[in-house]
Amino acid sequence: MANGRGGARSGAGRPKGSKNKLSKAKKATISELAGQHTEAALATLVDIMKSAIAPAAARVSAANSILDRAYGKVGLADAPDDDEAPALSISITSKAPVGDIRVTRSGG
């Protein structure tokens, strides 16, 4: 606490050049242990997704998790380029309440 208000302390953290304590062997062991529970974890996600009594947010989260594992997460690299995305323009036609603002597509 350099100034008494939190923030980074000088000398805090792992020193440069020192090795990470979580070695490749430990990471591999953790992956192997987690891999032993893959089927049970997927079955649990499916149960939550299909449950009529589970909250809607839990069901959606479970469904998204299943889709992510089946098809991969959609990242920024998968998003359309600016040239491919439709252009949008917003025009306010009058000084009406917010509910009357129209959004129209321009160009194509």
Image: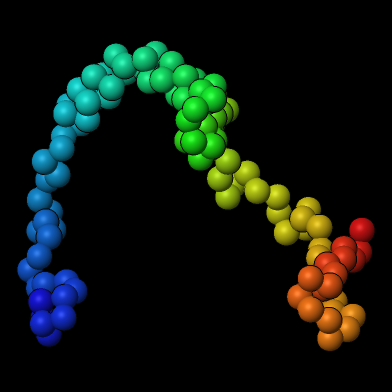
Which residue is located at x 73 percent, y 59 percent? 82
Q: Quadrant of the C terminus?
A: bottom right
Q: Quadrant of residue 29?
A: top left
Residue 63 makes an appearance in the image: yes
Between residue 100 and residue 29, name the one nearer to us. 100
Residue projecting furthest to the left: 11
Whole-percent x, y for residue 14 in the image: 11, 56
Which residue is located at x 87 percent, y 63 percent? 105
Residue 69 makes an appearance in the image: no
Which residue is located at x 49 percent, y 36 percent? 55
Identify whether 62 is placed above or below 14: above
Q: Quadrant of residue 96?
A: bottom right
Residue projecting furthest to the front: 53
Between residue 15 and residue 80, name the one nearer to us. 80
Identify whether 29 is placed above or below 5: above
Which residue is located at x 79 percent, y 71 percent? 99
Whole-percent x, y for residue 7 in the image: 19, 74
